[in-house]
Image (cartoon, helix red, strand yellow):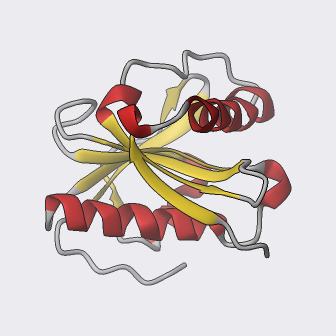
Amino acid sequence: MENLFWKIKSFHQLNVFELYGILRLRQEVFALEQNCVYLDVDGKDQFCDHIFGVDDAGKVIAYCRIVQPETGFSEVSIGRVATHPEHRNHGYGKLVMDKAINFIEDKYGPVSIKIEAQYYLEKFYSGYAFEPKSEVYLLDGIEHIEMVREKNAVHARV
């Protein structure tokens, strides 16, 4: 496992190379790998903090965005969690989730966090104290489930 250099930036702090790398990773994972046609650039990125790990060459390897409350949901939300396909099974997904939860706790205090999880990842997110709050539904042709991590929840690392 190579060491990544982790960054946390608001949309306006991102440089064009970082933004390009983030959007490229999201397209590789969510559009190409999952064969899903949807509008990834959804008008929320400007209201998000972006957490991403880059390798020595500056390539974005792992990513998620923290969506401000009242932007998508009434709660703060974590979305677009992605790890580059060539770098899976190295724990980067866990690292980015740890960083996201710690960031939210530092910025917002003890708050509930809501996610729209791909259903096959329900167990992964349960390890972070997220609990299902909806039935399974299709979003862009992929099974999802709404999950919430209640404020003051404690998670055991997956």
Residue 96 is situated, as x and y percent measured from the top left of the image, at 52, 62
Give the residue drawn at x 67%, y 66%: 4
Residue 30 is situated, as x and y percent measured from the top left of the image, at 67, 33
Look at the image and tell me whether residue 17 can be seen: yes
The quadrant holding residue 16 is top right
In the rendered image, which quarter contains the C terminus? Answer: bottom right
In the image, 83: left or right of 156?
A: right
In the image, 120: left or right of 57?
A: left
Judge whether 156 appears above or below 50 on screen: below
Give the residue drawn at x 56%, y 22%: 140
Which residue is the extreme one toward the bottom?
A: 156
Q: Count the marks.
A: 0
Residue 150 is situated, as x and y percent measured from the top left of the image, at 21, 64
The quadrant holding residue 3 is bottom right
Give the residue drawn at x 24%, y 40%: 68
Give the residue drawn at x 43%, y 84%: 156
User: Is residue 34 or residue 39 the one in the foreground?
Assistant: 39
Residue 1 is situated, as x and y percent measured from the top left of the image, at 79, 76
Judge whether 60 appears above or below 138 on screen: below
The quadrant holding residue 56 is bottom right
In the image, 62: left or right of 153?
A: right
Look at the image and tell me whether residue 130 can be seen: no
User: Is residue 35 or residue 71 the one in the foreground?
Assistant: 71
Judge whether 138 appears above or below 101 on screen: above
Which residue is the extreme one toward the right?
A: 86
